[in-house]
Amino acid sequence: MNNDLIDNPDSIPNATGGKTMNTAFETAEPDRLTTLDSDQARAFELETLRRVADLALLPPHLVTNPLPEFGYDRLDYAMNISLERTPGGRLFAAWVGGEDGPRAFMLLATSDDGGDSWSDPRLVIHGRSSGLPCPRSVIVGNLWCDPLGRLWFFFDQTMHHFDGRGGLWAIRCDRPEADELVWTTPRRIWHGSVLNKPIVLSTGEWLLAAQLLQNNGLGPFAQPLFPELDPLRGVNLLVSTDQGANWRVRGRVATVVHADWDEPTLVERRDASLWMLIRTGMGVVETVSTDGGRTWTPPKPHTTIRQTPSRCHLQRLASGRILLIKNGPKIDQASLDHPAARTQLSAWLSEDEGRTWCGGLILDDRAGVSYPDGCQGPDGRIFVSYDYDRSGHAHIMLARFTEDDVLAARVVSPGSELQRIIVRPRKNRKTQS
């Protein structure tokens, strides 16, 4: 790998960085185009698509007064993204509306009573604009409250569903418990996207696992538009040593067999090694770094954890235990029905750094439950959001529970509650269960 790409990610040329595939086609003169041979025509097609992908480099739109356009009565789809808690106790929930595809956009709601009730959407992030040659989507991301109490909202803006490059953007709210939420100007951090929270290492560094999918793109962008990014496809570890002011690529996980959407989630172990789980088409694989994320062991299937091809959630709890949220009623079983089915969302605890697992609290035993994310309050209570039946009921759900509940594999703690609804879109719904 070119070390310059790791040490200086800014050296990676964007499509607007002055490097075109064929500088002979800087202007599209009709007479010249009609005389191109097949190779020249193909080069012009790729260059044009690459320029279309540049539209994702334009800043997305922040809608801070989203009603009535984005009210629940006008929403009919919900894919869970993230749940976070501020030091003062406000809960933030983020989810994708529209679809898991080119017309996706991001929404945000809050709760000031521990999740009992939720606001209407308070923020919408979208890339819509009239006259685009194809949709521009804002899709996948995460919420994270940093050690300074500031709330970060990471999200991906891309043309179509994935244009081969994507774009990891971030905004920040420095006073997330204020009545009026004020966000920083959107900033593009890198390529690709994230689906899980950064972690703070024992060194004080912030580490963020970003995915740059191991394919050229989707839909019209399933073309070799960004060959200069091929050395960085996979899971890249971004590090910040200045509290998020700057991020740089520290290392990359080697090519993953049966790569899917990656969706890496990781924790730092007590010996300072990093342990990561990655989604693949064959289930979850694991990899370990002993040098702060610079190099990683070859990814291999986990010997115990079985998970459907879907997102899972890892988190270090205040007690020192590791929390895992996955699909399946057993740690070594993905589903009762089918290995790929997203059923029986469950919670597990490990006291030995992920080697063995205990508990098995079923958060939701229905089919169509997926994409968990979570946080923990100062009293130890755990909050987890996930989605149920994205295109049908389209609910974003909340589970509140304790480690005792997980260990008992049933709710035993006062105040714990499962299957509480956060988001209930109502467009074109005659009934709701």
Image: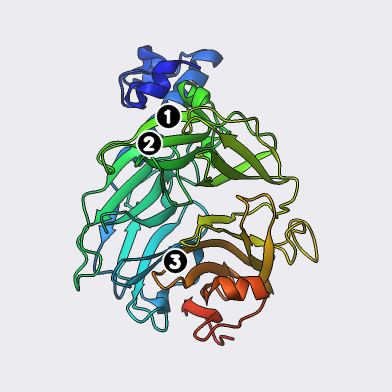
- State how far apart marks 1 and 2 are (Cα): 6 Å
The quarter of the picture where residue 26 lies is top left
- Disc 1 crowd, CA 10 A, few/some/many (<14, 14-19, 20+): many
**SS category of the residue bearing label 3:** strand
Q: Are marks 1 and 2 in contact (CB under 8 Å)?
A: yes
Which residue is denoted by mark 1 in the rendering?
Answer: 250
185, above or below 90, in the image: above
Which residue is denoted by mark 3 in the rendering?
Answer: 376
218, above or below 346, in the image: above
**SS category of the residue bearing label 2:** strand
Residue 287 vs residue 93: left or right?
Answer: right
User: At 43% from the left edge and 17% from the top edge, which residue is drawn?
Assistant: 3
User: At 36% from the left edge and 75% from the top edge, which residue is drawn?
Assistant: 71
Q: Are marks 2 and 3 in contact (CB under 8 Å)?
A: no
The quarter of the picture where residue 191 lies is top left
Q: Amino acid at mark 3?
A: Gln
User: At 64% from the left edge and 71% from the top edge, which residue is drawn?
Assistant: 407
**Which of marks 3 and 1 precedes in the sequence?**
1
- Disc 2 crowd, CA 10 A, few/some/many (<14, 14-19, 20+): many
Taking depth in this image into account, of 192 and 90 the one nearest to the observer is 90
**SS category of the residue bearing label 1:** strand
The image's mark for residue 239 is 2
Residue 329 vs residue 159: left or right?
Answer: right
Q: Amino acid at mark 1?
A: Arg
Q: Position of residue 19 (x, y in %)?
A: 35, 17
The image's mark for residue 258 is none
**Which of marks 3 and 2 precedes in the sequence?**
2
- State how far apart marks 2 and 3 are (Cα): 23 Å
Taking depth in this image into account, of 430 and 31 the one nearest to the observer is 430
**Which of marks 2 and 1 precedes in the sequence?**
2
> Does residue 259 appear in this view?
yes
Q: Amino acid at mark 2?
A: Val
